[in-house]
Image (cartoon, grey):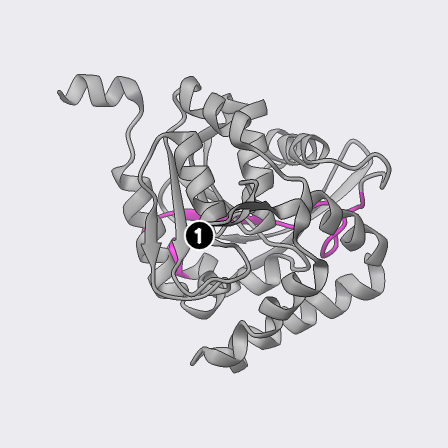
Amino acid sequence: MRDEVCRIARRSYGYGVVEGCGETVVLVHGWGLSHHSYRAAAEAIAAKGFRVVVPDLPGFGISSELPLFPASLPAYAQAMRRFLEGCDDVAGEPVHLVGHSFGGAVAAQLAHDAPELVRTLTLVSSVAGVTWERGEQGERLLAERPLWDWGLHLAREFPTTKRFPVAAMGVLRDLSHNLVWHFPNMSVVAAIILRSDLREELARVREGGVPAAVIWAADDRVITRACFDDQCEALGIDGRVVQGGHGWPLTEPDSFAATVGDIIRGVQTPAERAEAS
């Protein structure tokens, strides 16, 4: 992966690029991380015949922060729109947008706000639903979920994976950097996650004709099945359940790349489906 920095409208964006011979995939990282943690995932996707760009979201990695108040998902999506339109390594054609965790919420908002920039949308264990738990006693919303519960399941994530030493090294490096240099931003984003109900936006993405897919890992306890179901229902599609946990893109990059590659090649726009039939 080639590390780069571009400056757009007095704002710096860090990002990584893996050159390839195919269409461009933009992979949006999760909370607390940066493009460094996704090096193996990006290289695996590139090996499937794509060119991959992994931007640092504002206030993570080496990207400039957004004004903290009022920070919002639309503000993050707007910043990513400027990156897609202004970065020489991306600008020119619509991209295949893949968002993991909090990056999925940003990707979903961007597909809603600027569909002309998005060829396909793939949400991976994404923060884009509203439901924490759903059962016989009714529903509990993400806004009711205490921060310690999020932290508990995040802490349990990596030691159970066979690729833990490799994946953990990148995650701990990114997390340490962001805690030191971007702690206020990380706290604000954590609050945004708790109120990230994007069901209406996803329904409009569906109506606008952007091909979309939703992936969830069966052992993921950071993003729950109920949240995954919210996204599938809003998009009117059947999601795909894979084996793994929340960090599946980091701990199983080859499996992640194969799944994403299959999805990107398999999705069709409404016009393409009509022509095929």
Determine whether 16 is above or below 174 in the image.
above
The foreground one among 182 and 186 is 186
Extreme residue toward the left, this view: 277
**Does 59 appear in magenta?**
yes
Amino acid type, callout 1:
Arg
Direction from residue 114 to residue 11 in the image, left or right: right
The foreground one among 130 and 61 is 130
Dominant SS in magenta: loop
The foreground one among 200 and 273 is 200
Direction from residue 82 to residue 168 in the image, left or right: left
Counting from the top left corner in percent of width and height, residue 184 is at: 85, 53
Q: Residue at x 71, y 59 (%)?
A: 147
Counting from the top left corner in percent of width and height, residue 23 is at: 39, 39
SS category of the residue bearing label 1: helix
- Answer yes or no: is residue 193 visible: no
Q: Residue at x 77, y 49 (%)?
A: 59
- When asked about the image quadrant of residue 172, the answer is bottom right
Q: Which residue position holds label 1? A: 225
**Does 210 appear in magenta?**
no
Q: Residue at x 44, y 52 (%)?
A: 225
Instruction: Please report the bounds of the magenta region as a residue range.
Output: 44-65
Counting from the top left corner in percent of width and height, residue 127 is at: 56, 46
Counting from the top left corner in percent of width and height, residue 177 is at: 76, 66
Q: Residue at x 45, y 46 (%)?
A: 228
